Image (cartoon, grey):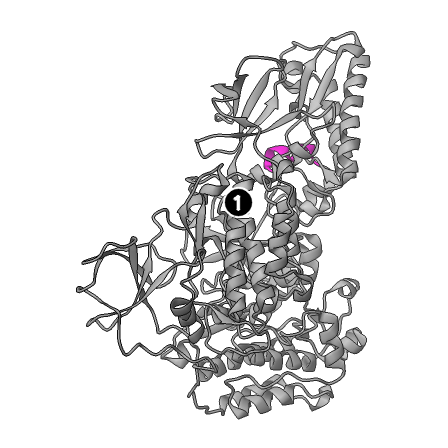
Amino acid sequence: MAILSKYNIEKYQFDIDVRKKHQLYGMSGKLIYEGKWISRRDDPIIIVEMNETIAESEARFYLEVNSHHNIIHTLGYVENSLNLTIFIQEFAQLTDLAGVLMDNQFIISQTILIEMFLQIADAMSYITSKKIVHGDLGCRNVLVFQLDLSQTKNNLVKITDFGLARWIDQPSSYQDQLVIPIRYCAPEILQNNRHEEYSEKSDVYSMGVLIWEALSNSEIPYSSIPKDDDVKQMKLNNEKLKKPHTCDHQLWTLMNNCWNNNPRDRPSFELIKQRLSNMKVSDNRDLRSFVSFHEPPAHYEYELDIDIEMHDLLNGQFGKTYEAEWISREERPIVLIVMDKEPSEYEALVYTNFNLHHHILYTFGFVENNRGLILLLQERALHGNLQVLLNNRQFQPLPIVLITIFLQIVEAMIYVISKDIVHGNLCCANVLVFQMHPSESTENLVKLTNFSLAHKNDPSFVDDRRLPIPVRYCAPEILRSAGRSNYSELSDVYSMGVLMWEACSNGKLPYESLKTNSEIRQRKLNGEKLSKPFMCDRQIWSIIEDCWHNEPQLRYNFKDMKKRFFNVRRDSIETSQYELNVNVKQRRPLNGNNGKFYEADWIPKKDPPIILIVMDEDIAEQEASFYMKFNSHSHIVHTFGFVKNDLKLTMLLQERALYGDLQTLLQNGKFQPSGEVLVAIFLQIIDAMIYITSQGIVHGDLRCINVLVFEMNSSDSRRNLVKLTNFRMSCEKDQSVSNKRVPQNLMQYCAPEIRRNQDRSNYSELSDVYSMGVLMWQACSKGAIP
C-alpha cells in the first residue's frame, strides 16, 4: 500500500514475527484474526486483512490518528504478495462496550460510564482536529481495554472501526456507496446524504446516541421499531429517544444538546469534554424494575438432611446442580439446584404451578436448610440434556424422531404461553431427555427446563433486571432492546427455530464461528440467518425458516406450529438409506489421503464400485450439500447418500472411478489422449460446469486432479467418460463468504481477481472459466503443475 511509506510504522513478517490464530470477524473484503507474536513481545494482538477497496476507504485513517491514547493503536504491517493491506493492531480482550454491557456480567456505574464518555470525547476531539469525520460512533465501535468497577481512572476505552470515516475537505467517489447507520446518524444526513452534511457536529449527534445506548445497557436505538426506514421517518419527524431508565439529569441534558436539529446549536467535542469533566452524579440505581421476586415460603415441605441428602456436583445449565437422594421415601430420581438468587415471580410460577404438564420438568419445591442457600428440588433426567447427547453423538435420532421431540417441546410451550409467560431461553441445553430411541418415535420423552429467563408475555412490558441475553438463540427484537422488552410468544417461536436448527445440526452451537456477542447481534440485526443443516429434512427446514421472520407478526404461533408438524408427510421424510456394516462395508484407505477416502463394498456385493468418504466436520455441511444437489448430472460424480454409523462420523457414499483422477493418469503416462479425445473430455467438463452454473453455484477448484476418469481410450473420443468432483471450495455466486481463503498451492489455478483479493464474493462463472483454461493447459501438458 503506497501510503505506508508516509507513516512510521514497523514492518513484520508472517511466521517470523507473527502468526495468525483463529478468525474473530469476517466481512466482504475484511478479515480480523487473533494474532500471536513469535518473537520480540507478548502483548495481545489482532491481524486485520483488508482488500484494496476496503484499504482505500479505511486504512489511512488508522494511521493518521495512530498516536492517540483512546484510539486503537496500529503496531505495524505485514508485507505480502496478495495485494492485501495487513495491519497488526492491539487486541481488546474484553471486546467492545456493546458486548460488555449486553453480557450483564458487570454493573457499570454512571460514574465509570462518564469516564468512558470523556475518553471517547477526547479521542473524537483529536479526530476532528485531523479534519476527519468518524461516521459510525456507537458502543460496538468502542473497545474496552481495562475495566475496573472500583477505580474510575483505571478504566480504558478506545475508538475503532473507520470503515465509514471520511475527510471533511476531501470528497471521494467511494463515499457514495457507504452505508448510513440510520439509528445513530444525524437527521441532516438522513435528509440529504451530501458530503457537506458530514461534520464534527454530525459525529456529536451520534455521540449523544452512544451515551443513550450505554446508559440503556446496549439497547439498540428505537428498539421497538424493526424497520430502519420507519426509524428514518421518525427521526426526520423530530421524534427523539426517550430518557433511559437509569440516567442522571446532567447526562440527559447533554444528550438532548447533542440532538439539536440545527447542527450549529450542538456542542463541540471540546465542550462535551468540559461538561463531562465537571459532572458529579449519583449512582443509586433501582435494579429491581417492575418485576417482583418470589418470597420464600413460610412452611417448607422438604428439609435438607431430614428428607433429602445432597451429593456430588453435576453440570447444570443454571445455578449449581447437585446429585441428591431421598432419605425416607421411594420416589423418582432427584437433583438439588442451588439458585444464584431468588426466582422472579414468573420463574416461581413455573416451579409452583406447572407440575401437571408431562413435558415440563417436575419441581417438588424449595428445600429448607441452615446453609443460607436457595435450594430447589427437581426430578432428574438420567440421560442429561439434548445438546450434549447430540453433540457427543450419543443420540442420533432419525428425522421422524426429531419431529416427535419438537412436538413435545411445542406442547410444553403452548401450555407455558397459556399462563401468559414466555420461556426466554429455548435451546437444546434446556431440554432434558428422559427416554431416547434413535428410530422409534414412541420411545422418546423430553421435558423443558430452566425458566430463569422467563418473562411476561407482553412485548411492551419493560424489564430492567439486566438478565443475561442468550444472543445466539434470541429473536432480533430482543437484541434490539438489549433484553429489556419485546418478549412475546413470537420471540420464543424464533428461538424454537434456532433450537430445531441446533438439533438438526447434531447439537452444533449456532453462529459457531463468531466469537463475540456484539458481532452475532450485528449479524442477526442485519438479517443474517443460519444456513440449512445439510442433513435436515426439507419439510422440517421449511418450518424452521418460518420461525425466523424479522418482523414478529409474520411468524406463526406455537399452536400453528403444532398443526404444521402434524401435516408433515411422514412417508417422504429424508433419511439415511445406508448403514455401515448393514448395507456397506468399509475397507482399506485409498491414496494415503489421511484416511479420508476408503474402498468399500456393497452388502451383498454388487455393482457399481463404491468408495466411502469420511468428511471433515468443519466442511461437511457445505461440501455434502453440493454433492447431493448435483447428483443427477452424468458428468458429476454420483453420490448415493449418507451412511449411518456408530463411529460418530459423517460418511458419504459415492461411486468409484477405477482409473482414478485425470492428473495422475496424465502424469504417469497411463493415459495419452489424442487432441480429439481431449476435446471430448473438455466438453464433458464444460457440460457439467454449465449445469453447476445454472444452479447459481461456482465450483471454485477446477483442476485435472478433480476430474475422475470412468472410461478411457486414447484414440476413440466416444469411449471416454469423466466426472467432476471435489466441491470443497464451492460457493453460491455473489455470496459474501470471506472466512475461507484459497490455499497457497492453489493460487496458480485461480483467476487474477481471486489472487488479488482472495475474497469469496469475487467468485463467479467467469473466475471458473479462467480456471477451466488452466485445467485445459494442464491436460495438454501431460498433467503438469502450472
Q: Is residue 74 visible?
A: no
Residue 342 as seen in the image, left or right of residue 405: left
Q: Nearer the viewer, residue 43 or 391?
A: 391
Image quadrant containing the C terminus: top right
Where is 517 relative to 685, above or below? below
Q: Mark 1 is on which residue type?
A: Leu
Q: Where residue 195 sits in the image (x, y, percent)?
A: 78, 73
Q: Is residue 153 visible?
A: yes
Quadrant position of the N terminus in the picture: bottom right
The vertical placement of 105 against 651, above or below, is: below
Q: Is residue 747 magenta?
A: yes
Disc 1 on helix, strand or loop? helix
Q: Is residue 358 left or right of residue 181?
A: left
Q: Which residue is mark 1?
A: 402
Closer to us: 253 or 756: 253
Q: Which residues are magenta?
A: 743-750
Magenta stretch holds residue 106: no
Image x and y of residue 348, in percent:
40, 71
Expressed as whole percent of the image width and height from the top left, the position of residue 664 reads: 62, 17
Quadrant in the picture for residue 44:
bottom left
Horizontally, is 387 left or right of 460 in the view? left
In this picture, is 334 found above or below 735? below
Task: Please name the residue shown 55% across and 41% down the image.
Answer: 400
Q: Nearer the viewer, residue 255 or 93?
A: 255
Task: Name the spot of residue 298 as percent of width and height, x first.
Answer: 28, 79
Rendered image quadrant of residue 524: bottom right
**Residue drawn at the location 50% of the way across and 59% of the way down:** 412
Q: Nearer the viewer, residue 769 or 174?
A: 769
What residue lies at 79% left-to-right and 78% top-to-bottom?
191
Q: How many marks?
A: 1
